[in-house]
């Protein structure tokens, strides 16, 4: 072989390797982070080790049976996520689609787009969709410069059918059975004003509940939210999400909520304040509510269907406590706040309701606080803390303003929702330890979580606190919990989904 013929393949390989190294070495800087913390967080992610996927004409695929050892940042294209990612997935100028089997140890964030979740995918730190702004990518000699750009809706359809032809995501519980809402959505003024009327059929009650929701945005930071309708309400939706609770009811007959029926009118005004590390959104509003019981004892002739637990008195036939029928007139004052710096993230939701109840001329103020804080410790290990507090001042609140503890989702060694009242404190600490060395195909690495739960609830005050210690072993979206009450020396073993508390 001639020397030139031998050198030519080497030159070709060298050229390809050089091009790949230049692609991998592209630098991306946030030139204009804009208001709020998102641009600063994006700049921090770009300054840390990451995998960059540059702009392209088609969606990028993070394929199944592959793993990424660090955060993945995708510029100006959609991302389809099927892989295991030891970090965040940040999509700038596109949508993120989670497919079954995907496991993301951090967050999935879409800037200028939306995150579309899958019930069979896991995101340890949740998802974020920021649709009202994006970052334009301007090519430079060495990579790209990102500039903040509010999105402008140039046109919008005045009439749409959200969901599947207007049919919304259903829910399922032991009182309503299947709740199926249907209705159109009306959009005005290039999308700033939306009116969302629905009719919800509740199969176990055999009723149709009308409702209308209005969202009116006056600029990016000021909005008014309206609600008018008849519905079934609960104070226990902080324990599990609607999706998780519906799945538990349908599959196992476990319902972590108590319910009552209400006609409600509510209006709130919201104002957003932003800084580079924090967001604060206070609100003020009024509410008029006429309540009645959805009471049922364990001897009911008919209960909604479930795969398991339909005949047990502590599952589908669990009694639903009665409330005091009457009318509440309330003033609302509260705020939602988030803070993030150096990978430490905290959220806080506070609602104060000053109410007058027409039965017994009761007057009370009830404060409800829910907070979380999450931060990394060593390697991929993580600590997160959550709390839920209800405090009532003045007269005793009527039972439709009571909250409950016990059983799945809170204190597993107690009977389900066996503690309740207008005072409640629940504190939960978790230390998450993944075993990355055993990163299995599709399901990812196993993990253990050390947990401590502490809580109490009562009427007029708090009785003695109960506590549980637990060890959680998880693989993908499946988990097994071993829980002990150290005071009573009682044990509880349970299995479930990692999507739940």
Image (spheres, rainbow, N blue to C red):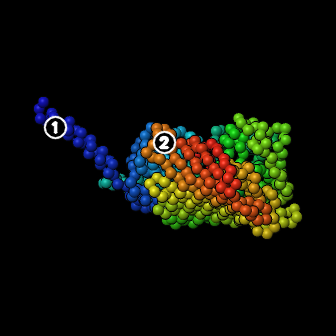
Left or right of 195 on screen, residue 295: right
- C-alpha span from label 2 to label 1: 44 Å
Which residue occupies the foreground of this view, 390 or 352? 390
Which residue occupies the foreground of this view, 480 or 343? 480
**Which secondary structure, mark 2?**
loop
What residue is shown at x 83% (from left), y 46% (from top)?
296
Q: Which residue is mark 1?
A: 7
**In this rendering, is residue 359 above or below 158?**
below
Q: Position of residue 302 (x, y in %)?
A: 82, 38
Write down the quadrant of residue 405 in the picture.
bottom right
Determine if residue 15 is in view: yes
What residue is shown at x 74% (from left), y 49% (from top)?
415
Left or right of 193 on screen, residue 294: right
Write down the quadrant of residue 371 in the picture.
bottom right
Disc 2 vs disc 1: which is toward the camera? 2
Determine if residue 73 is in view: no
Q: Position of residue 36 (x, y in %)?
A: 51, 63
Task: Give the mark nearer the N terminus: 2 vs 1.
Answer: 1
Q: Position of residue 239 (x, y in %)?
A: 67, 52
**Which secondary structure, mark 1?**
helix
What residue is shown at x 79% (from left), y 62% (from top)?
459
Q: For the N terminus, give its image quadrant.
A: top left
Q: Position of residue 47 (x, y in %)?
A: 39, 58
Q: Mark on residue 444?
A: 2
């Amino acid at each position: 072989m001639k020397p030139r013929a031998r050198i030519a393949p080497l030159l070709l390989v060298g050229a390809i390797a050089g091009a790949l190294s230049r692609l991998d070495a592209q630098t991306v800087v946030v030139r204009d982070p804009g208001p709020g913390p998102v641009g600063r967080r994006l700049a921090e992610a770009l300054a840390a080790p990451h995998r960059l996927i540059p702009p392209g004409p088609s969606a990028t695929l993070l394929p199944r049976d592959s793993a990424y050892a660090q955060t993945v940042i995708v510029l100006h294209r959609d991302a389809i996520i099927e892989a295991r990612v030891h970090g965040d997935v940040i999509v700038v100028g596109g949508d993120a689609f989670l497919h079954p089997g995907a496991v993301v140890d951090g967050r999935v964030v879409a800037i200028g787009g939306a995150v579309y979740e899958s019930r069979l995918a896991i995101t340890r730190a949740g998802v974020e969709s920021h649709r009202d702004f994006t970052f334009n990518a301007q090519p430079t000699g060495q990579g790209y410069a990102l500039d903040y750009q509010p999105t402008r809706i140039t046109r919008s359809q005045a009439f749409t059918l959200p969901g599947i032809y207007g049919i919304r995501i259903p829910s399922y519980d032991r009182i309503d059975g299947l709740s199926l809402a249907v209705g159109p959505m009306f959009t005005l003024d290039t999308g700033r004003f939306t009116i969302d009327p629905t009719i919800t059929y509740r199969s176990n009650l055999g009723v149709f509940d009308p409702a209308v929701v209005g969202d009116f945005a006056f600029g990016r930071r000021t909005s008014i939210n309206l609600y008018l309708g008849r519905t079934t309400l609960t104070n226990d939706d902080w324990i599990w999400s609607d999706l998780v609770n519906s799945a538990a009811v349908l599959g196992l007959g476990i319902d972590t909520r108590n319910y009552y029926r209400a006609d409600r009118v509510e209006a709130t005004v919201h104002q957003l304040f932003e800084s580079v590390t924090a967001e604060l959104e206070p609100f003020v509003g009024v509410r008029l509510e006429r309540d009645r019981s959805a009471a049922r004892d364990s001897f009911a002739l008919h209960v909604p269907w479930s795969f398991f637990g339909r005949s047990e008195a502590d599952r589908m036939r669990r009694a639903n406590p009665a409330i005091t029928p009457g009318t509440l007139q309330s003033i609302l004052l509260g705020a939602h706040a988030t803070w993030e710096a150096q990978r430490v993230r905290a959220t806080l939701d506070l609602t104060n309701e000053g109410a007058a109840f027409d039965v017994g001329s009761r007057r009370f103020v009830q404060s409800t606080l829910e907070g979380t804080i999450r931060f990394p410790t060593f390697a991929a290990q993580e600590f997160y803390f959550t709390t839920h507090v209800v405090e009532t001042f003045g007269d005793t609140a009527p039972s439709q303003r009571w909250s409950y503890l016990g059983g799945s989702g809170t204190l597993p060694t107690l009977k389900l929702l066996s503690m309740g009242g207008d005072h409640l404190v629940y504190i939960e600490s978790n230390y998450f330890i993944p075993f990355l060395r055993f990163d299995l195909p599709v399901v990812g690495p196993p993990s253990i979580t050390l947990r401590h739960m502490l809580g109490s609830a009562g009427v007029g005050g708090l009785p003695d606190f109960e506590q549980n210690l637990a060890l959680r072993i998880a693989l993908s979206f499946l988990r097994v919990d071993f829980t002990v009450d150290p005071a009573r020396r009682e044990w509880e073993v349970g299995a479930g989904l990692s999507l739940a508390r």
